[in-house]
Image (cartoon, rainbow, N blue to C red):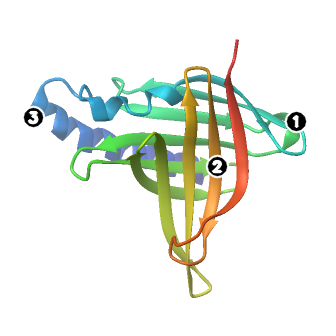
Amino acid sequence: MIAQMRLLAVILILMFSITGYAEENQKPCSTPEFRQFDFWVGTWDLTWEQDGKGTNTITRILGDCVILENFDGGESMTLRGMSVSAFDPQSAHWRQTWVDNDGTYLDFTGAMQGENMILARTFTRAGKVLMQRMVFRDIKPDSLIWDWQRSTDQGKTWENLWTIHYRRAK
């Protein structure tokens, strides 16, 4: 319930910030930057090591201004989660908020870097600065690879913790 309330708060904040942008431009969310995540929109079959299988459904909502993700770890894991992503024209970056059934709340910022979409976050745990990031790579019309990585040296090196292979559901 708390996670759903946080998600609602994030959606409302995004709506108010995007509404201000829309008033200035008359065609909200129509610039190419707002379309950078279009590769991810759809229904996906997921696979990962140790015979992991799940699904992810990504849709555009709120006048095509927000990307909504619904992740289901299937029988492979109990993880269920969702995210909302929106392009912030003031910073020229994407912002994503993730919540899940473990009570996790994560906030990311990022952008296209070459042919990859990279969203990252920095936080402190037990006095140590840590970084996490998602890398969407090898993007094709019916497939992509998603890497979950962490850095303990301010981003000088990255350790890959989880790779998910996406295949568009038939």
Quadrant in which the C terminus is drawn: top right
Q: Is residue 46 left or right of residue 148?
A: right
Q: Earlier in the sequence, mark 3 or mark 2?
A: 3
Residue named by callout 2: 147
Instruction: Look at the numbered disc 2 and give the secondary structure of its residue.
Output: strand
Residue lying furthest bottom = 127
Q: Residue at point 62% right, 85% down?
A: 126
Q: Residue at point 52% right, 72% down?
A: 156
Instruction: Note whether 96 is above or below 54 in the view shown.
Output: below
Q: CA distance from mark 1 to mark 3?
A: 47 Å
Q: Amino acid at mark 3?
A: Glu
Q: Residue at point 77% right, 33% down?
A: 54
Question: Residue 150, how many percent across, how many down?
Answer: 62, 65
Residue named by callout 3: 24
Q: CA distance from mark 2 to mark 1?
A: 21 Å
Q: Amino acid at mark 1?
A: Glu
Q: Amino acid at mark 2?
A: Asp
Q: Earlier in the sequence, mark 2 or mark 1?
A: 1
Instruction: Note whether 132 is above or below 87 in the view shown.
Output: below
Q: CA distance from mark 3 to mark 2?
A: 37 Å
Q: Residues within 10 Å of mark 3 (few under 14, many from 20)?
A: few
Instruction: Look at the numbered disc 1 and give the secondary structure of its residue.
Output: helix
Q: Residue at point 51% right, 70% down?
A: 155
Q: Residues within 10 Å of mark 1 (few under 14, many from 20)?
A: few
Q: Are marks 2 and 1 in contact (CB under 8 Å)?
A: no
Q: Mark on residue 75?
A: 1
Question: Residue 110, how many percent across, how many down?
Answer: 41, 52
Q: Are marks 1 and 3 in contact (CB under 8 Å)?
A: no
Question: Residue 169, how many percent across, how many down?
Answer: 69, 17
